[in-house]
Image (cartoon, rainbow, N blue to C red):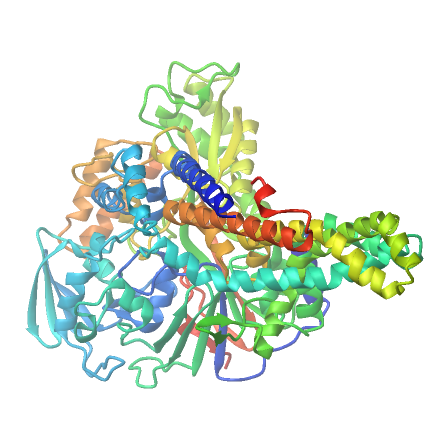
Amino acid sequence: MRFATGLIAAAFAAGAFATAGWSAELKVGVMAEPNSMDPHYHTLTPNISMAAAVFERLVEHDETQNKIPGLAESWKQLAPNVWEFKLRKGVKWHDGSPFTAADVVFTYGRAGNVPNSPSSYGLYTKVVKEFEVVDDHTIRFKTAGPFPLMPDYASQIFVISKKNGEGATTQDYNSGKAMVGTGPYKFVEWVPGNHIAYAKNADFHGNKPEWDKVTVRPITNDSARVAALLAGDVDFIDFPSTVDIASLRKNPKINLSQVQSTRMIYLHLDSNRDKSPFVFDLNGQPLDKNPLKDARVRKALSLAINRQAIAERTMEGLSVPAGQYMPSNVYGTAPDLKPDPFDVKKAKELLAEAGYPNGFAVTVHGPNDRYVNDEKVTQAVAQMLTRAGIKADVVTMPSATFFQKSSALEYSVMLLGWAVGYADPSNPLRALLQTYNKATGAGATNRGRYSNPALDAKIDAALNAPTREEWAKLTQEATRIAVADTAIVPLHFQVNVWAMRKGLTYAARADEYTLIQSVRTAK
Amino acid sequence: MLVFLIRRLSQSLVVLLVMSFLVFVGVFAIGDPVELLVSPDADQFERARVIRDLGLDRPLWEQYGVFLLQSLKGDLGNSFVFNQPALQLILERMPATLELAFAAVIIAIVIGIPLGMVAGLRPHAWYSRMIMSVSILGFSLPTFWVGLMMIMLFAVMLGWLPASGRGETVDLLGVPVSFLSEDGLRHLLLPAINLALFKVSLVIRLTRAGMRENMLMDYVKFAYAKGLSHGRVIFVHVLKNILVPIVTVVGLELGNVIAFAVVTESIFAWPGMGKLLIDSIYRLDRPIVVAYLMITVLMFILINLIVDILYSVLDPRVRIADVKS
C-alpha cells in the first residue's frame, strides 16, 4: 500500500493532472463520514464538522481555539453560578423566522435527550439547572454551584430552531426535514456513503459564504483521497497521510494548510496497583512490586524518550513535542512548562535510585488504527525505553480491541491520545488524572488509575472556582503538580493537515474540524 | 422439485441460526463497542447510560434471545452507530454494490469466454500464449494495487476518468442506478474493471480448459464427420458443453463479488455495502455485521439454487431431483 501511495504521489509531482474548472462549486473529500445529520445525536468529530456548516453555537472557537462570538454576541459571569449570554439580534433561521432566546431554551431541552444517542450532549447541558429568559436576546444559565467552564460547554451545543425542531427525531434531521439552522450553508441532502450537499445561505449574518454549492464525499482510503484531489475530482481533502505529505508539498498545483492540534499523544502508566500485569524482571518473571508506582521511574521513562526524533522521523515532521496536556498557547496552561529533555544518563540514574539499577521489562500496548502513525510511534517509544534500560516489548492491535482492554486495566504502559472539542486544560486533568470515582464521574478515562490526593483537591478547586481567572490559575497549578509527578508521559501533539488545489486556502484548525465555510479562494 | 426446495430451505435455516450465533459471540469477544462510541470525556454515568440504551448490560444469552425473537418478525435490530434498522442501512447501499458486481461479472463473461475459446482452439499460437500470460497477472496482482495503478494512470495522469465515487444516478424502477447516465458510466468503469480482473482470468482459464478437453471428444469428431460447419460445432455444440462449469463458478463468484467487494469499494470510494461491513466491523456495530452476514448467507443459498436450476437447463442429463445440495 505504501509503495502504491508513493507512486501515486510521484505521478503528481511529475506533472500532468487535470485541474477542475473555476466554478462556484466546492467539492470536498473527507476521511470520515458523519453517522447522522442530527447535530445532537453523537459527540463525534465528523458529525460536528458537517453540522457546523448549517448550525451555529452560542460561542464559537476560531482556528487557534480562541473563543469568539457565535450566536451570542457576548457573555459574562454575573455570579459564580450565573452566566448571562447576550444573543445576536437580527439573525434569521434558514426558513426566515427570527432567532430568539426561546430557541436556546428549546435546544438545551433536546440536546441531552436524543433517544439512543451513542454519546450524548447531556455531558454539556446537564450542568445548567435553570434558564432565565430576560428578554428575547438575553438569557441566563444557572448552575448548582460555581461553574467557570460555561462558555466552553456552550461552545459544544448547536442551537436548533424551536419551530422546526419540535417533535423532530434524528430521522427528520437525516432526511433534511428538520435541518434548519442559522449557519452559512443550507442543507440540501445526504445520501449515506455517497455525499452530503449544501447550498449557500446568502442571508448569513457573519462572514459571507463563498460557494453556491458544496458537495462533501467520504473517501476513507488515504491514497484514494489524495488521488481524488490530484485527479481534480475534489478540490479539497482532509488528513492526507504522512507518507504523501512530502510529495504533495513539492507539487506546484497543491496547497497544504497545517497547524498544531490540541490532540495529545501520551503514555498512560499503571501507577496505582501493587502489581501490574505487564511489568517483569529481566528474566520475564512478574515483579512483586510495581515500579510504575514510583514517580522517579515514571520520570525516567519520560527522560528516555527522544521526542524530537519521533517528531522528525516517525511523524515526518507532523508532531510537536509535548511537555503538558494542552498546547501552551491555550488559556489555563503553564506556558513555561517544556517537554522533558532526552537524557538517558539521568534516566538510568533515576532508575538506579528507585532500586532498578539494571532496569526491568515492560510491554507497551497501543492501537494501530486510531492515531497518526500510532503503531510506529509505539515501536519507537519501546526502542527508546529499551536503550535506557527498560526492556520494552510492543503489542499493537485494532482500537476495537485495544480500548476495551485498556479500560479494563489489563495493561501496564499504554499509548493513547486525548483531545476535546474545546481547548480546556482542566478537562484532561479531570478525565485522565483525577482519582477514578464512579459516584462523582471523576477520572472516567483514567486508564492507569493514577491517584494523587493533592492533585484531586486542586482539580476540584479549579472546577469550582468562582471566576474564570481563578479557574485558570488553579488549573495551571494542578498541571504543575501532575507534570512534576510525571502522572502520565505526554509525547507530542499531532499536526493536522489539509490539502487543496492551488488557489484555495484553509484556516487549519487545532480542533481537527473540517469546516467547509473556512475553505476560500486565495486573495 | 418441491422436496428439493423444502430440503434446501430447511438446511438454510440451520445455517442462518448457527452463523448468527457465531457472529454474535465473535463480535462480543472482540471488544466493547461502547468504548468506541462514547466521547472520551464522557463520565461514568454517560457510559452506563449508553450501555443500558444499547441493551449491552444484559447477559449475552439474553441479548441473543431478544435478537432471535425480533428477527422472526423481520427486525434484525438497530445499528449501534446509526440508530437505524440494520437491514434498512444495508438495503440502502445494496443497489450500488449489485450494480458494480453485475458490471464486473458481465465484463468477465464478455471478455473471458471469447479469449478463453481462442486460447483453447489454438493453444500453441503466440496470441494464445499471450492471453494465458496476461491471465496469470490477473490472478496474481492484488486488487488494491491494480486499483491504485488504474487511478494513477487513467484519472491522475491521463485525466480520462474520475478517480472515485459513484457519479450521477438515475432512478430505474425506484432503484438508483448509474449505468444509465454518461457520468455514472464513467464512474463505474474503473471499479468494475478492477473488480472483474480476477474473474476474467478465471473465466479464460475455465473456458480454455473446457475447449481443449471437448475438442478431443468423439461428439466433436462426429459433428465434423456429419459435415457441420466449424462455426456451428464450436458455438452450438462445444460452447454448450463447456458452459456448465463456467456457470457454476461465475455464479459462486457473483456471490463473492457482491458480498466482499470491500477492497474495490474502499479504494474507489464506491458507496456500497461492502464498505459498510468493514466500517461496522471496526466499530463493532454488531447488528449490522450480523444482518449483513445473514443476507450474505441467504444470497449464496439463492445463487446456488439458481445455478442448480441452470445446470439442468444446460445439461439435460442432470435432473433437479438428483442434485443433492
In the image, is B33 to the left or to the right of B57? right
Nearest the eye: A357 or A117? A117
Which residue is at 39% across, 33% downward? Answer: A405
Which residue is at 33% across, 65% downward? Answer: A37
Q: Is residue B181 above or below residue A457?
A: below
Q: How far across and down, in percent of the image, does residue B303 sit?
A: 55, 52
Q: How far across and down, in percent of the image, does residue A336 sit?
A: 37, 48
Q: Is residue A13 above or below residue B14?
A: below
Q: How far across and down, in percent of the image, does residue B39 sit?
A: 31, 49
Nearest the eye: B150 or A86? B150
| Residue sitting farthest toward the front | B226
In the image, is A466 to the left or to the right of A291? left
In the image, is A249 to the left or to the right of B20? right
Tell me which corner region of the image, top left, top right, bottom left or bottom right, holds residue B195: bottom right
* Number of marks in picture: 0
Nearest the eye: B4 or A75? B4
Tell me which corner region of the image, top left, top right, bottom left or bottom right, holds residue B184: bottom right
Which residue is at 15% across, 50% downward? Answer: A465
Q: Is residue B244 above or below residue A510?
A: above
Tell me which corner region of the image, top left, top right, bottom left or bottom right, holds residue A81: bottom left
Q: How far across and down, in percent of the image, does residue A129 sit?
A: 9, 56
Q: Is residue A62 visible?
A: no
Which residue is at 54% across, 47% downward? Answer: A311
Q: Is residue B281 visible?
A: yes
Q: Is residue A79 above or below residue A25?
A: above
In the image, is A83 to the left or to the right of A472? left
